[in-house]
Amino acid sequence: MSHEYVPEIAIDRDGKKHEVQGWQGDFYGGKLGFWLFMLTEVMMFGAMFLTLTYYFTLHHQDFIDASSHLNRLLGGTNTVVLLFSALTMGLGLLKMRSGDVKGAKLMIWATILLALVFLGIKAVEWREEYTHGVFLGLDALQSGNEHSRPFGQILFYGMYFTMTGLHGFHIIIGIGLMLWLLKRINAGKVSTEHHILHFNIALYWDLVHLIWVFVFPYFYMIGAGNAH
Amino acid sequence: MSKSYLEVGETHCAIGHPKSVFWQWMLTVDHKRIGLMYAAVILTFFAVGVLVALTIRIELFAPGAQILDGDTYNQAFTLHGVIMIFLFIIPGVPAVFGNIVMPLMIGAKDVSFPRLNWFTFWLYIFGAIVALTSLWTGGGFADTGWTFYAPYSLNTNTNVITTLVAAFILGMASILTGLNFLVTIHRLRAPGMDFFKMPLFVWGIYATAWIQLLATPVVGITLILALLEKVFGIGIFDPSKGGDPVLFEHLFWIYSHPAVYLMILPAFGIMSEIIPVFSRREVFGYRTIALSSASIAGIGYLVWGHHLFTSGMSDLAKTIFSFLTFFVAIPTGIKFYDWVATMYKGKIILSTPMLWALGTMITFVIGGLTGVTIAMIGADIHLQDTYYTVAHFHYAMLGGVVFLLFAGLHYWFPLMFGKMYNEKHAKIAFYLNFVGFNILWFPMFIAGYQGMPRRYFDYLPEFQIYHQISFFGALIFITGLIYMFTVLIKGIKNGTPSGANPWHATTLEWHLPSSPPPLENHTKVPYVDFRPYEYHHGEPVVKFDYKTMQRID
């Protein structure tokens, strides 16, 4: 759009010239903006981790009991898948910077594939829990009926579905962003010289996997020593 | 002479290059036009909020039911709160003057992300529409109060869900505004302008933007959790499933207390602009005012607990929160002394913006000092949820933020429209507002101290006199508001041309080639090697040649 932007020059009283920073083509500004946006995500998930920690202190044993029933094999696999996708995303950005646009596109496709695998495994997991009667809105997670779980377990599963759900929502958004990025690359709008969009989406993807790195131990591992 | 930004075709658009004037406004990315549209929408919501408040006042004219029943009364004060807080005062000063004036003040052509700015405006409009649809859909508008306290908000049959969604969307808009301003202030300052050469309004916007960015996500996720609680029953805030409703209050106030500083800091920024200009003196203690904004924003994060003194908290936590709350008074006090010291031996000119600023000094001091009294745990146990707190809040918000918003409206009016309103009538409007405001709110301190609880539909006969004085004050106040807006609208229509710098101000937004400013602001970006408020013998020191934007003094 504004690739031909020529910065203005301001002249001070000694006649010295100073380049003016415009909003057009401001790579650093685009980076700063997205870092700030990532900060809001940290605050958002931070508030949920705060809630989680508070209830973990209140209902310690219930949390450990509930956690021991989660599927650590699938959760662990998903962690590995997501870490790999962060790797492919990072490699893609490196390739884009070094001018290998084709390689970068390949890496983005690999990231999308891994993201889909993650969602697939997640779906299997949720389905398994659903068949065991543990899901949002089912009797086990409501109070005052014969299937009701103890308070701490209701809270644990409530937070589990909320946080993994919101995380999954971020993954879906990420896939959408990557498809958009591919479209922009094909249209020649994102290139080695102008790759701020690629940079920011890679940053986003890093945050998504970083959140999972905290979600995984907090939900899956606290009950690991208690598993049957 | 360059064309005004208000003329047909003088705008950049987010999509394409539409010919019609209507679409040129709808799709505009120009920060000045977006700011004007915010002003129009926000002031419309203000008018609606005032009308709802008037309805509440009429209802309270005598004990027992007058024109509303109890449930409708609950919905009315919730509607008043939601409109005034989420639709009016939170976007308020940053969205209007942050957009119109801040880029001009730092010599930028626009904000850092003009398209995002456009998107943000429409996100705000969308949030507002969602909020208003809940008036007519489902079980009617929420009756929880604007704070949505659990567990009542989880059990009521009114349309809390829609209101929560709306508040979340409006929060998103607020975050994106803050983000845009932060990047703008960091990246687009004119060459030579370091942080301590920025006008103080920019400092206010800067501190505010950090609060918008860091505090709003917390309330966003809290509202999402409350929403999931209502839809799926996840139990987080519901005591019948082991959840803790007090946790909701904590999470809510972690945002909503910093939010009051989010409202007041840019308003203080307006005060810091007006006082030096109309005293024709360099501002006293520039650095202390700038840094006090930053420290209010910082300390403001640590005081939310004072809303929970009666909700169940350990005595130690109460003591700490009370102590930290007192601390906020220190940077605020510094600002006030600086402003007074600026005026000392100045050449004070009592134009309308200055009158509003001086009026605010009185009303905000009352609002601020009564805030210190209810920061004391012992006094707060007695005064919590009484009219005393209501009066304190309105003295600080209406008598602080909104009065300064009006001050800014008068101060930057010639900048926005290139015309001047009728000064004489604008002054009369100020006095009406000021007198009406005090008659409206002061009796509530007494009623509250004697035990009149807030949000009550009915009351004991001994409080009647206070409610009736308040009602009388409300009538004067509303007359004043109508008067003021009439004067301003007449000014837009057929005011006399004002020239580019009618107030003899020094900051960059007054050094423009034409009045109103052209599309991309300054002809050329100036090199800033001067402090923002330099006066010598009552005259601005720095002068520019507006063709080259070089200093000629």
Image (cartoon, rainbow, N blue to C red):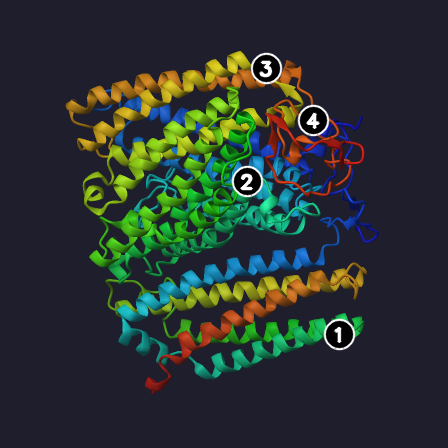
Instruction: Provide the secondary structure element on which disc 4 rests.
Output: loop
User: In this rendering, do the residues under marks 2 and 3 share a single chain?
Assistant: yes
Callout 1 amino acid: Lys
Callout 4 amino acid: Pro
Q: Give whichever of discs 2 and 4 has the lower sequence position.
A: 2
Query: What residue is rendered at 36% in x and 17% in y?
Result: B475
Residue B203, image quadrant = top right
Q: Which residue is mark 1?
A: A95
Q: Disc 2: which chain?
A: B
Q: Which residue is mark 4?
A: B516
Q: Is residue B476 above or below residue B343?
A: above
Q: Disc 4: which chain?
A: B
Q: Which-is-in-front pick, marks 4 and 3? A: 4
Q: Which residue is mark 2?
A: B200
Q: Which-is-in-front pick, marks 1 and 4? A: 4
Q: Disc 1: which chain?
A: A
Q: Disc 3: which chain?
A: B
Q: Nearer the viewer, residue B87 or B241?
A: B87
Query: What residue is rendered at 79% in x and 71% in y?
Result: A101
Q: Badge 2, how many Cα within 10 Å: few under 14, some, many 20+?
A: many
> Residue B27's x, y, as percent?
69, 38
Q: Give whichever of discs 4 and 3 has the lower sequence position.
A: 3
Residue B418, image quadrant = top right
User: In this rendering, do the residues under marks 4 and 3 share a single chain?
Assistant: yes
Callout 3 amino acid: Lys
Which residue is situated farthest in the top direction here? B424
Q: Is residue B549 above or below residue B465?
A: below
